[in-house]
Amino acid sequence: MVLRRLGRLAGIALVLAALGCRATDPAPPPPSPTSRPVSVLPTPSDPPPTSPLPSPTPQPQLAARVNGQPIYLDDYERQLDRYRIALTDQGVEPDSQEGENLLNQARDQILDGLIERALVEQAAAERGVEVTEADVERHMRELAVEAGGEESLRTKLAGWGETYESAQREVRAQLIGLAMAERVVSAVPQSAEHVRARHILVDTAEEADQLVAELESGADFAALARARSQDSSTGVNGGDLGYLPRGILLVPEVEETVFSLQAGQISGVVESDLGYHIVMVVERDPHRSISSENLQLLHQQAVQAWLEDLWGQAEVERLLGASP
């Protein structure tokens, strides 16, 4: 298979996950009305007054820092707890071997998700991208309608260990992510140069050389592809890959070859991790509208490349169990 599989658009799902709500220390109790008044004026024999040292405020533990911004451990643990609940809902006991394996796989993914969200929010702040309270409330109302009313939504959130306020914060973060993704994909053109090509994939260099010799002797490319190509998804169609803009082919060696040929030309043997390819260009179109499926894939690639660039420029410290 040399065509890329279409996946989900990166990072754009409204998942209600908690951001920790930290309680403040309780206020000290008022003095008892029956307590004896005590003079605060010193007598000559009194030692000079000293101010009591304030008790240090416990600092919340961190899971990570992202360009200096803390990611709190309780935020990470709350999302991990949500994952445990999801496992239970799917019939997987979190304490079972399967559950432990899935939880271990999820730990890094959950932390990476929190780090990536911080990176996106930082990028949005740098570019002046904001989400209004009205935007957040509109989406909260939509969630409430889907849940059967606000009280029903609050009940469901409580069952997940969440609050309405934590859901608002999560919705805000996801709307910021959507806004940034829309900015990224807006730069992807709606039309581009396309090449219509065919290819044959075989397992050995010897067979590929034999096919090249047959093609040079006048054999029909489509017929050879149907009979000999190991790419089952295209071989039945004579190796037809359709009209392709750049970025759609999975194998970079094949893509470079395709865009280097003129209409009617056949390549030599092209080696890749998949095997040995022979490519024929049927037609070139310098300005063709990109199909919706290919455009969605190019959007996905653009968002993924942007996220990878944010990661590449970031200073990320993983600090599970540390304090600021």
Image (spheres, helix red, strand yellow):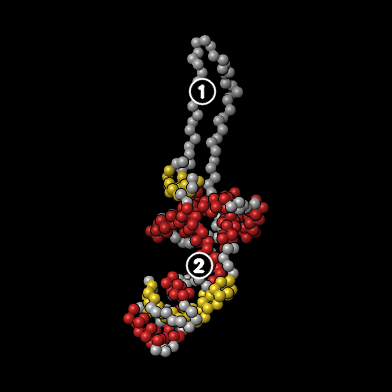
Tag 2 near tag 1, CB within 8 Å: no
Labels 2 and 1: the sequence-earlier one: 2
Could you tell me how many numbered marks the image carries?
Answer: 2
Disc 1: which residue: 51
Residue 40 appears in which quarter of the rendering?
top right
Q: In the visual, does 177 lie left or right of 255?
A: right
256, above or below 24, in the image: below
Identify the disc placed on residue 235: none
User: What amino acid is labelled 2 in the image?
Assistant: Gly
213, above or below 63, in the image: below
Residue 223 appears in which quarter of the rendering?
bottom left
Q: Position of residue 314 (x, y in %)?
A: 47, 51
Please give the name of the residue rendered at 61% of the width and 55% of the height, measured from the top-left corner.
Answer: 153
The 10 Å Cα crowd at callout 1, few under 14, some 14 to 19, many 20 or more, is few
Please give the name of the residue rendered at 50% of the width and 20% of the height, measured from the top-left corner.
Answer: 50
Decide which of 251, 105 is in the foreground and name it.
251
Q: Secondary structure at mark 1?
A: loop
User: What amino acid is labelled 1 in the image?
Assistant: Ser
Q: Position of residue 164 (x, y in %)?
A: 60, 50
251, above or below 24, in the image: below
Q: Position of residue 212 (x, y in %)?
A: 38, 83
Please give the name of the residue rendered at 47% of the width and 47% of the height, measured from the top-left corner.
Answer: 65
Residue 20: tell me if it is visible.
Answer: yes
Disc 2: which residue: 7
